[in-house]
Every structure is written in structure tokens, then in C-alpha cells.
Amino acid sequence: DTAVSQTPKYLVTQMGNDKSIKCEQNLGHDTMYWYKQDSKKFLKIMFSYNNKELIINETVPNRFSPKSPDKAHLNLHINSLELGDSAVYFCASSNMWGDQETQYFGPGTRLLVL
Amino acid sequence: GESVGLHLPTLSVQEGDNSIINCAYSNSASDYFIWYKQESGKGPQFIIDIRSNMDKRQGQRVTVLLNKTVKHLSLQIAATQPGDSAVYFCAENSGGNQFYFGTGTSLTVIP
């Protein structure tokens, strides 16, 4: 049983396109995150949602728009894709915002913008 | 922003030897730390954590040491196995759920 799942696993697209990545967790957690990992493996948080409410919004271009339809899902929509958006995007979830809880990561979505 | 860095970007060890992966952090307010393991093509996986009221914590074949004086933590892996080959990250937290990750150390175990 997958705890945190993401689709698609691989995404290859042209510059200027709009794409979405989906994330679902079945852990019953109420906080979800999106991270970006660059080619040097550096992991940086992008967004965090707690109970469908945006909590963390790091300095991310407004071409990136997260959407949380319910506690178990956090999707990431990216408009007008650029070459620099190529990276691995990880979704994560944790229990209880405000506590220092371990985050559980999905398998990642490998985005390549051509 | 936070600065969490690792001293060595790559580490190669012989199978059966012990491995030590180091991490420096700059935020003296950080009081919770996690080590993650990321295998090729997978997401980071929790290994062990430690809070600032401790200086050592042991798990199964892994030990984390925390030195708050010099803002340094390390991950020790005993009897390293080929399955331990991965990138290891330390992550720091100073409250709430926002973690800052280090750049990662790539561990290669030589059979």
C-alpha cells in the first residue's frame, strides 16, 4: 500500500505548456507539502497546506499554483513551463501542523522541460 | 534563509566498515533534526531523528550524534551494507513543520 503517491512519475513537455502533478496520501495526515529537488539533489520546500489551507508559500513564481481539494490531496499546477522548471518534484505529508512531525515523501515526479 | 550543509558530498566505504556522514547547520534555534536516506529514483525516507535535548540517539545500525556547541550532527552507520548506498540528507527544524534540508552526501558501498 502506497502511503504518499504521485502521478505522473515522469513528465516530459515543451516550454510554454501548462501541466499538473497530482499527490495523494492515505496516512490520514492533515498537512501536505511540495518540494523541488534540483539536479544537485538540493531539496527546497515550495508550499505547505494544512487542512486545505495554504500555510507555507516560499519564494516560488506565481506560475506554480497548488490546489488542495481535500486533506488527502495536494495537486501542483504549473503554467507556462520554463527550462528551469526541470527538476524532481516531491510531495510529502505529516501529521499535525505546528508539531515537529516527520514528513513522509512520495516517489517524486521527474519533470523535463524541453 | 537557513543554511544546512554537509562536509563531504561523496563518501565511499568498504562493505562491513562503519560510515560517518557529517552535517553542519547554522541556525542556533534549530531544535529538531532528521536524517533521511534517498535511494536512486525514490523519495527521501526517514532514518532517525534527534531533538536538541539529546546528544545521541541510536537506532538499528544507525546512530545520530548532535553537538549543539558547534552546530554539527553526524550519522553513523555500522557495518555498512550495499543496500546503504544512497544519498543522505540532514534536515533541521526550529519549530512548526518547516524543515530545511542540507545538500546531501552520496554514500557508495564497495562490495
Image: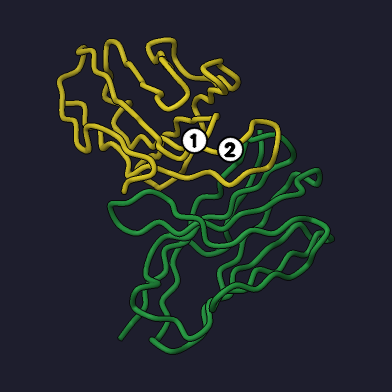
The image quarter in which residue A68 lies: top left
The disc placed on residue A95 is 2
The disc placed on residue A52 is none
Q: CA distance from mark 2 to mark 1?
A: 8 Å
* The chain in yellow: A
- Label 2–label 1 contact, CB within 8 A: yes
The image quarter in which residue B49 lies: bottom right
Q: Residue at x 70, y 32 (%)?
A: A98
The disc placed on residue A28 is 1
Q: Residue at x 32, y 51 (%)?
A: B42
Above or below: residue B33 compared with residue B54? above
State which quarter of the image contains the C terminus of chain A.
top left
Q: Residue at x 24, y 17 (%)?
A: A19
Q: Nearer the viewer, residue B88 or A34?
A: A34
Chain to which mark 2 belongs = A
Q: Nearer the viewer, residue A67 or A80?
A: A67
Above or below: residue B84 compared with residue A25? below
What's the residue type where badge 2 is placed?
Asn
State the image coordinates of residue A99 (x, y, percent, origin top left).
Answer: 70, 38
